[in-house]
Image (cartoon, grey):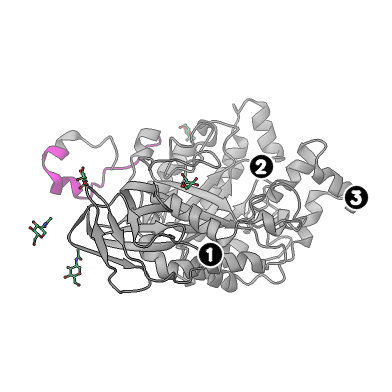
Amino acid sequence: MSPMSPPPLLLLGVALALLPAAADRYTPDWASIDARPLPAWYDEAKLGIFVHWGVFSVPGFGKYSEWFWWNWRGAKGTDEMKFMEENFQPGFSYEDFAPRFHAEFFDPDAWAEIFQASGARYVVFTTKHHDGFANWPSKTSWNWNSVDTGPHRDVVGEISAAIRRKSIHLGLYHSMFEWFNPMYLADKASGYQTQDFVFTKALPELVDLVLKYKPDLIWSDGDWEAPDTYWNSTEFLAWLYNDSPVKDIVVTNDRWGKGCYCKHGGYYNCADRFSPVTPPDHKWEKCQSIDTHSWGYRRNMKLDELMDLPSIISDFVNTVALGGNYLLNIGPMHDGMIAPVFEERLRGVGGWLDVNGEAIYATRPWRVSYENGTVPVWYTATASSVYAILLKWPQQNPFKLDAPNTSNSTNVTLLGDPTLLKWAPVNPKGLTVTLPEMPPCPGNAWTLKLDGVA
Ligand SMILES: *[C@@H]1O[C@H](CO)[C@@H](O)[C@H](O)[C@H]1NC(C)=O
Ligand SMILES: *[C@@H]1O[C@H](CO)[C@@H](O)[C@H](O)[C@H]1NC(C)=O
Ligand SMILES: *[C@@H]1O[C@H](CO)[C@@H](O)[C@H](O)[C@H]1NC(C)=O
Ligand SMILES: *[C@@H]1O[C@H](CO)[C@@H](O)[C@H](O)[C@H]1NC(C)=O
Ligand SMILES: *[C@@H]1O[C@H](CO)[C@@H](O)[C@H](O)[C@H]1NC(C)=O
């Protein structure tokens, strides 16, 4: 497990090497941490739902509403400043939004039912964003947490339990830094030579989250101003992987300090809007918000700023064909409602997966990822089948696929209909398939299942 394993063990053969070695522990350095195999559930899951909810959902305004406080107080000449001047009394502070975070309609089981209906196999929820507001009763966030003020509920606890009841994996988002925390700002002023914020706030809260809610995934963020040595990230991860109650199942991302992303940790998020064109050699995840302008809810969002179902499916399929997972974001409203337009999108994804999920869950990239003959086609594969996902219904019939090599036992079906389709080989490679009439598909993406092709 660790690259520190004594080489002679390997010489004794595969069987011995697979025996659990009690002495093998991860050490707090990237070589050891990065060598940990990613727990298999994550790659098989493919779809997660990202949920941004907190005090920022109350003003629910601006470019990236979860950045509201910063854009109001930390920047100059912004729409957020104008909004506050025009709509609030002088002296109104960001903290004054917290008591208005009533969450009176918050029903965690209703949320979990929507997440399940989307076909997602994991959910990532904001326990604490850059404003530092803790959505659980954090002892180190006195009066700035969801039990002392706002909803007066353990939001993380309630969501965790509801998600678990639906057998969905639990992911917790956690921001390392807090824009305006005086302790963080003092460490920053020292050039990160002091670590008071890390040892009295960031790490104790991370450990508290792990021990209380036993997450299957930790989505770290807000790491980029300071090096991983300031955050003591490798020490935390070594504890997480060696001794925590989730050591065997937990998955992490790559935001563990300045310069870490796309290099260290668990799977890679890389930079925002990372979009590879061939499958990277490391597991990765694309996060994408249905509201293309914001992660948190914006009361001023417009319909044409939202992704429609076909564009979500196209992005999702593209990501999975290149080996990625897709983390699709919604921002619930401050009162606890999920806007019906987001709910409709999520149920739409689930409806598409009901028919086409076989081409998504637990698949891997195929030797060819994409072809664009008459219509755009993304390929995925399992040990026995190749899936060609068509992002348009072809005008030509029979329809030609260029990449698959057929054999005498090749079979072709359209997912959702077991009827074998007529096909013919094309010389020197590829095949033509005789398609039925276009079946209705709200996601606008149809899957041909090919057995017995290379
Ligand atoms: C932080 O990292 C330093 C350097 O590895 C180590 O000496 C110290 O014990 C760590 N502290 C915690 C609380 O992990
Ligand atoms: C696929 O081909 C169509 C028609 O030639 C073209 O309009 C489209 O841009 C192509 N798409 C990509 C992603 O290359
Ligand atoms: C598919 O067929 C082509 C043309 O005969 C051949 O060059 C190629 O190696 C084949 N690929 C596989 C994976 O069988
Ligand atoms: C396909 O079947 C034909 C005739 O039955 C046979 O000659 C040929 O070798 C077979 N090809 C493959 C790839 O199995
Ligand atoms: C194709 O279908 C036939 C008839 O159902 C079956 O005998 C054959 O095994 C199938 N081929 C593959 C590659 O699954």
- Labels in figure, total: 3
Q: Which mark is residue 160?
A: 1
- Residue 168 % position (x, y): 46, 65
Q: CA distance from mark 2 to mark 1?
A: 24 Å
Three-letter code, disc 2 = Glu
| Residue 49 visible, this orientation | no
Secondary structure under badge 2? loop
- Magenta stretch, residue numbers: 10-29
| Residue 358 visible, this orientation | yes
- Residue 271 % position (x, y): 53, 38
For the N terminus, which image quadrant?
top left
Secondary structure under badge 3? helix
Magenta stretch: dominant secondary structure: loop
Residue that carries the numbered disc 2 in the rendered image? 178
Give the label, 2 or 3, closer to the camera.
Answer: 3
Q: Return the disc, 2 or 1, that comes first in the chain's sequence.
A: 1
Mark 3 neighbour class, 10 Å CA radius: few under 14, some 14 to 19, many 20 or more? few
Q: Is residue 268 magenta?
A: no
Q: Return the disc, 3 or 1, that comes first in the chain's sequence.
A: 3
- Frontmost residue, 175 versus 79: 79
Q: CA distance from mark 3 to mark 1?
A: 38 Å
Residue that carries the numbered disc 3 in the rendered image? 86
Q: Which residue appears at 12% of the width and 37% of the height? A: 11
Three-letter code, disc 1 = Ser
